[in-house]
């Protein structure tokens, strides 16, 4: 595999792994602050980041060894509104800079496995940014919590939706039974 795509996959694996951990911590904080729906949202999206991290790791299956892995990561344990902004900022970076660039590079280098893994993550992060925005708007406008239906995560690609499930995942075509629902 080409070196730049290998590096991009490693760094994306690192970024997604840290996002998973960060969202679990921010989910616990939301629970403590009395926002059970936002806690549930953070936990659902944390699980989607696991799907992305695992997909990138699997795409690196032949790349054995102890390597430096670096990526952008949002830090800070503030109140839930601040933490949601951190989520929005991280997801926005991924969908406007990181994944479009990684994906174009993988296409240029004809790395099919990386292209698929980056496409899945790129599409999933769009849904995350929108859900975090909805949650932040709700509590910033004085609501007690965000009004949130069941949140479901495709365990194949990490695409995430609120409410009724489609018959198939719109990104990877997985069937309904491949979704995990956080209700
Ligand atoms: Fe995400
Ligand atoms: Fe999917």
Image: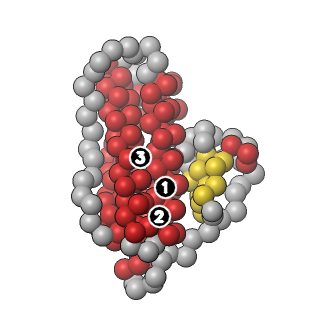
Q: What percent of the width, then of the height, locates residue 148? A: 57, 71
Viewer-nearest residue: 145 or 156: 145
* Mark 1: secondary structure: helix
Disc 1 CB within 8 Å of nearest ligand 1 atom: no
Q: Which mark is residue 43?
A: 1
Quadrant, the C terminus: bottom right
Q: Residue furthest bottom?
A: 142
Q: Which mark is residue 20?
A: 3
Q: Residue furthest front?
A: 32
- Tag 2 residue: 39
Q: What percent of the width, then of the height, locates residue 160? A: 56, 53
* Label 3, residues with CA under 10 Å away: few <14, some 14-19, many ≥20: many
* Label 1, residues with CA under 10 Å away: few <14, some 14-19, many ≥20: many
Q: How many badges with numbers are in the image?
A: 3
Viewer-nearest residue: 90 or 105: 90
Q: Give the left or right position of residue 106, taking residue 159 as reference.
A: left
Q: Which residue is rendered at x = 34% and y = 36% of the image? A: 14
Q: What percent of the width, then of the height, locates residue 39? A: 47, 64
């Amino acid at each position: 595999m080409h070196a730049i795509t290998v590096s991009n996959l490693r760094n994306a694996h690192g970024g997604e792994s840290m996002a998973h951990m960060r969202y679990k911590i921010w989910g616990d904080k939301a629970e403590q602050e009395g926002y059970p729906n936002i806690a549930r949202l953070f936990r659902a999206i944390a699980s989607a980041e696991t799907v992305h991290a695992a997909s990138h790791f699997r795409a690196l299956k032949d790349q054995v060894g102890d390597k430096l892995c670096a990526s952008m990561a949002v830090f800070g344990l503030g109140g839930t509104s601040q933490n949601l902004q951190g989520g929005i900022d991280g997801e926005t970076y991924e969908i406007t800079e990181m994944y479009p660039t990684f994906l174009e590079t993988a296409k240029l280098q004809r790395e099919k496995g990386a292209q698929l893994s980056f496409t899945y993550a790129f599409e999933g992060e769009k849904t995350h940014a929108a859900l975090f925005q909805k949650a932040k708007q709700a509590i910033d406008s004085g609501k007690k919590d965000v009004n949130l239906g069941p949140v479901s995560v495709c365990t194949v690609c990490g695409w995430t939706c609120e409410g009724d499930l489609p018959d198939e995942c719109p990104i990877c075509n997985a069937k309904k039974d491949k979704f995990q629902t956080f209700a």
